[in-house]
Image (tube, coloured by chain):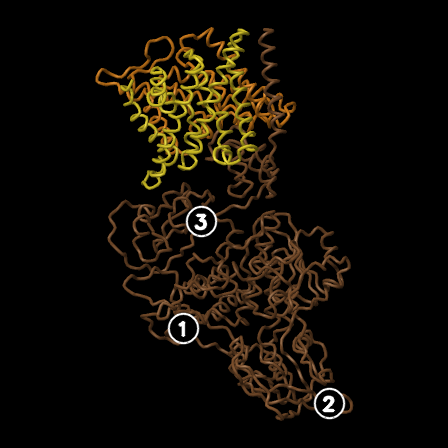
Chain colours: A orange, B brown, C yellow
Amino acid sequence: MAQSLAKEFTKGLWAEIPPFRLVLGLCPTLAVTKTVENGIGMGVATAFVLVFSNLLVSMLRNLIPSKVRIACYIVIIATFVTIVELLMQAFTYPLYLKLGIFIPLIVVNCILLGRAEAFASKNSPILSLADGLGMGIGYTLALGALGGVREIIGHGTLTFWGGTPVFEMGAWFHPFAFMIQAPGAFVALGLMLCFMNLMGKQ
Amino acid sequence: MIPALLFMLGIGAVCGIILSLSSKVFYVYEDPRIANVENNLAGANCGGCGYAGCSAAAEAIVTGKELPSLCIISGKEGAEKVAQIMGVDVCSAESPLSYSMCEGGSRAADKYHYMGISSCRAMAVVFGGKRVCSVGCIGLGDCVKACKFGALQLGPKGYPVVDDDKCVGCGACQQACPKEIIEVKTLSEKLMKFNQKQDPLAPCAQTCPAEINIPRYINQIKEGRYKEAVQTIRMRNPLPLACGRVCPHPCESECRRGIEDEPVSINQLKRFASDYEMDSGSRIPIKCAPDTGKKIAVIGGGPSGLSCAFFLRRIGHQVDIFEAMPKLGGMLRYGIPEYRLPKKVLDWEIQGILDLGIKSFCHVKFGADFGLGSLMASGYNAVFLGVGAWKDYSLGIEGENLDGCYTGIDFLQKMSSGKKVNLGKRAAVVGGGNTAVDCARTLLRSGLEKVYMVYRRTRKEMPANEVEIVASEEEGIEFVFLAAPTRVIGDDSDKTTHIEYLKMQLGEPDASGRRRPEPIEGSETLLEVDMVISAIGQSPDPSFKEQDPHKRMVELELTRWNTIDNDPATMQASIPYIFTAGDAATGPSLVVEAIGGGRRAARSIDLFLKGRPVEPVKDSLQQKRIRESIFKKVDGIKKTPRAKMPEIQVDGRLDSFVEVDLVLPEDTAHEEAKRCLDCCRICYNPDTDFPIAGNN
Amino acid sequence: MEDLFVLAISCIFINNILLAQYLGNCPFLGTSKKMETAIGMAMAVIFVLVMAGGLTWIVNEYLLKTLDVEYLQTVSFILVIASLVQFVEMFLKKSIPALYSGLGIFLPLITTNCAVMGVALINMKEGYSFLEAIVASFAYAIGYGLALILFAGIRERILLARVPKPLQDTSIGLITAGIIAITFMSFKGMV
């Protein structure tokens, strides 16, 4: 049990890490990773929804009639998304403004529905929780990494909460603004995928 | 709080009602499996699979365009469930492997110097490639680049070579190849491949009724890879030992080498490879696809039945053979004498087929001992009827029932199964076909003093194999040509004493192109014999149709020659779940024809069991020739005589039933294989211009 | 009228939904492997986006606002869009099979396409009138189709090219999309 729990948790961190291995949930990946802060914020929000929706779907898996299951999953996910939206509005308003419509759009992130259907609907709540947590953390890490890369190249800084950069490139470095704009997002993600392919699955 | 609750309830209810109503109103029938499969896909409609939504993906899976593992989200479990719905075994869905049609040989010189990007696709756009061969591999390795698993490599000859262990059957190479020569196929698909008009086929492979890839196995023999050669043959022919001995090899008459020189001794090479396996003492393992759980009854254990059973088993179905005679083999056992095909060899070969997991029930006659009803009740999903043609035509002359008169197949069958036959001293065999020759040679070996062969026409028109006729001449059989028996004369105790015949002369050619023999009035001649064997042809025995206790066979339609009426392209009979091939469908014909028919029937049965329409193979060649591949002239051949078939001396033959023809020694087989021109395995040199037959 | 035209142009080119707003990327990569699929998908997006744009505007204006439950936007929009798509799919299948075979199979793909949901949310955020919402939805959809078809064309060409192994497939696809996005950036001066 403990072993499979660990397995379900860790697979989301590397072997099946979204969006690099499972090429899903690309829109927020591209849109909000201008800075590492945004990336992690988005990742945490998604992870929150993922964990709770996985848990609830798993708990209700025997009650939901299979014909309307997709609709039920969507409603469950949408509920948690609304909760996250309200929470963020209340506690992290600046981040809420930065992420904009991508918070409500967590609803249509295929990772959530995909995990609900592929995993939570078939496994016990505890395993589903582990799966959700693993995938959520993996997604957060991926978004953070992408945000970090884009921020360093695009701004020349690396900023976590608090406003003061924890890391700054020297004055010699001329920020490469292309990276924080839309095209840069595509190129950066493309290169990240390439990097992951080079690293292999192990 | 309250408005929010009310709102959610309201909007939920409205959506629910509208959708459930419209699902009733706008109901359109579709394959229930599609909905079922869709339920087991992730349902996220993410498009990651490349299909537009899960229902489109489900449809692609159900229609067989995609594998159950299509969905990228639902993972292994989902794939297993889908596989279950599709009736494929859960853990063993058959895995396809990459397979290159173009197998390489020597390469021709380039048409032009190519400086473009190193990509097959780009070069295919420029005049279809830089070499003259318009079918074959371009050789720049797009497929190798496309393979993510390192399973493909360009071999030493510049063609992709597949590493079966690494290939996962993803199909990337197939997509990358601009010439459709590398394909991802399952074992079943490879086994059920039939010659098509667009295939690169050597004339011999076009001609072979079993559609064996002849140049491929000859090449394998040339390279000393005998086991692979046997496997190549077994992809199309389960009875290489028998065929290597008795096949009249129509392929050899189309051999391109035969245009300028003697044709390659193809059948001898087949026999060499298959004898190599038998003499090595161990059987080469035969791969089968995973079980499908479908059950088929094969009625008749002759060549067509064995072939159909063999291929059905290899593509994963469960097969039971029912045979009326005491042992399997059909005409191979009971119609072909020991000196041509020793029973020991046949037994070894049939055992190899049964070892795949085919059950056989002998001594049960369809119609008399069991019927269609009982087969259906036992859970068989389809029936193959390969009952052969065992009923001899009678001569229709006075006295043919006298003591000492036999019919051909009846006689051979009695001899083969060791039943007592009253042999005389002098015999006349009526007929000019293989059965007649077999009867005559068997009689000679049984100690008769004189054997005549009485035939209506001349030696030129004899339908028997040339080799057989020559051998019987050598052995001292006397031929009486242009003779039509008119009556058999007996003594007081009804024992045969003479056969009377009319002398004939040849008239104008008839529809079949043979000159019609006409009797010469008053030319009655007597021949002193005490045995008369009439072997003038056979037809299937349709008695099972009436004997069937449930009268379900009544709907089975027969032709006016008593053969079972079927669609020659699909082998399906007038009852949809009955398929038939071999002599029962074609009338007496070649073993290799029955083998080819059995495989074609296996393909149709497989389609039928999968619930797909039983359609003919598209652009199927079915022994028609590809016109531009039949040359009139082949240049540059240095004449080398073909390997002589070793045989035992005439004086050693007649006192026993020892096999007459011997297998080629290994070095001779090598030399013979080297004579093969590798047709359709080389891209022709542009400087040599091959005249094509029919184009003058 | 002029305003609507400017709105349309800016929605198609400058704020292109795929390349500038980052919406609808999953099916963008999935369905752009072949030109044929890309065209079908583009048509389906145009069809659904306009209908969804109008319907969600009505739901927002007359239901959510009147009942003062705007925080239920996400839940109600996704429900409405999912039901709409399913309804349209069933309707087309039965009534206009020819149209269904062309774009019907792409409809379900749009349910969880963030482009549809995203456009609905953008419309509300910008406070468009009904007419503006319809025009914007249509223009966004055209922009989506434009980018998708351009991209599919390029991807078919990429098959010819020699791509290093780790970059193959999605990776090179994304980089290509980035380059198309650069070209779309140059539209910024238009309006």
Most extreme residue toward the front, as rendered?
A: C1
Above or below: residue B471 compared with residue B117: below
Which residue has dot 1 on it? B258
Residue at 61 percent across and 60 percent down: it is B566
Q: What is the three-letter code of the residue carrying label 2?
A: Gly
Crowding at dot 1, Cα within 10 Å, few <14 / some 14-19 / many 20+, comes out as some
Is B358 on the left-hand or right-hand side of C154?
Answer: right
Residue B445, quarter of the rendered image: bottom right
Asked if badges 1 and 3 are on one and the same chain, I answer yes
Which residue has dot 3 on it? B183
Q: Chain of mark 2?
A: B
Please identify, in this view, whether the residue under mark 2 or under mark 1 is nearer the observer. 2
Contact (CB < 8 A) between labels 3 and 2?
no
Asked if badges 3 and 2 are on one and the same chain, I answer yes
Q: What is the three-letter code of the residue carrying label 3?
A: Glu
Q: Is residue B14 visible?
A: yes
- SS for callout 2: strand
Q: Chain of mark 1?
A: B
- SS for callout 3: strand
> Which badge, 2 or 1, comes first in the chain's sequence?
1
Which residue has dot 2 on it? B490
In front here: B210 or A131? Answer: B210
| x and y percentages locating residue B676 in the rendered image | 40, 67
